[in-house]
Image: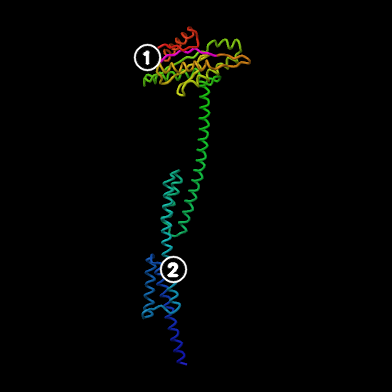
Amino acid sequence: MEEYNDDKRLSSLEFTKRISRLLLVCLNGVSELKAGDQGLSDKLKELSNLLVEVLGEKIESPPVLGAELEQVFDELVVQKYLIDKERETAKQVFIAFTKTIYELSRSSGEFDEILTEQIDVIEAAENMSDILSAKDVVLGQTKKIQTETHAMREELEESKKTTSDLTQLLEQVETKAMIDPLTQVFNRGTYNIEIGKMIKKFKRYKDPAALIIIDIDHFKKFNDDYGHKAGDAVLTLVASVIKDAVRDTDMVFRYGGEEFVVLLNKLDIKNALKVAEKVREAIESHHLKNKSTMLKVTASIGLSCFKEGDVETTIFERADKALYQGKQNGRNRVEQVL
């Protein structure tokens, strides 16, 4: 009986030791996991030392269960390390992301303030949940800005389109104001602007230039004999012929009634005369059919070149004087006054 009690007592002692060893393994595992908490680590160390004293021997891991516990704690330590690394990596990624958005946007004080707050939240985050919450705020604000930016872009595009339409309309209005509606060449008002520009250009660069006045011969007869529609057809024909005969750089104007003016750029007297003669011949070679009658059209042309001291009126007056000479000399001819 006594022997039985001794065996029972020995078994209890072995059980106590085994439990103590397991406790020691747990304490060591917890100490590793909570290495950053110095207060708790110190208390765990005291408790561990006490267990070692109680056992009074070198502690080895108990069989089976002790080894399993050590493995569990080893895995937990590794897992904690990876979680910590993951959290720090996530912090760096989201902080960089947020700062990039902050630098790129600078759209409003409110948005900048929210981003700055979230950077602070991420930097102070102790767990992934805090980081992910901050991430959601940043992404939400970014989406809001994207929506606003998209709306602004649409407004800008609409504004551009409106501006373009208005510019086009303005150009059309300006063009209408500059063009003679019947003949589709420039009108008298445009001539008054362009002759001033040409005088200034001549004074500055001294490039040769000339002015010719074209007057349709016996124009009143077309109106009287065949009606105003026939007269309008003659004006339209002559304007078209003049445009085709001169260069693209030259400007054709309907000065008034049956009179047209052409400003010839960079042409000396010799070449200006050639152009004037070309215009006269072109007009003469065209005929206008009115019902069964073929109408013959001719024009008289006066020419003058720009010279030092000219103003808008002097150059025109010389060309007009040349035109008068042409009419006096039989019409359908080119005359010049230097």
**Numbered label attached to residue 76:** 2
Q: Position of residue 153 (x, y in %)?
A: 50, 40
Q: Is 221 inside the magenta-drawn segment?
A: no
Determine whether, in the image, residue 68 is placed left or right of residue 56.
right
Marks 2 and 1: in contact by CB < 8 Å?
A: no
Q: Say whether disc 1 or disc 2 marks the residue closer to the N-terminus.
A: 2
Q: Position of residue 273 (x, y in %)?
A: 43, 16
Q: Amino acid at mark 2?
A: Leu
Against 124, residue 17 (above or below) is below
Q: Residues within 10 Å of mark 1 (few under 14, many from 20)?
A: few
Q: Which residues are magenta?
A: 297-305
Name the residue furthest right: 292
Q: Is 300 inside the magenta-drawn segment?
A: yes
Q: Amino acid at mark 1?
A: Gly
Against 103, residue 334 (above or below) is above
Which of the pair 92/180 is nearer the observer? 180
- SS class of the residue under badge 1? loop
Residue at image position (43%, 65%) is 80
Against 19, residue 267 (above or below) is above
- The answer to which image quadrant residue 62 occupies is bottom left
Q: Position of residue 151 (x, y in %)?
A: 52, 42
Quarter that holds the C terminus: top left
Determine whether, in the image, residue 137 is placed left or right of residue 58.
right
Q: Which residue is label 1 attached to?
A: 309
Against 297, residue 138 (above or below) is below
Which of the pair 266/202 is nearer the observer? 266
Which of the pair 187/112 is nearer the observer? 187
Q: Main secondary structure of the magenta part?
A: strand
Q: Position of residue 326 (x, y in %)?
A: 47, 9
- The answer to which image quadrant residue 229 occupies is top right
Q: Residues within 10 Å of mark 2 (few under 14, many from 20)?
A: some
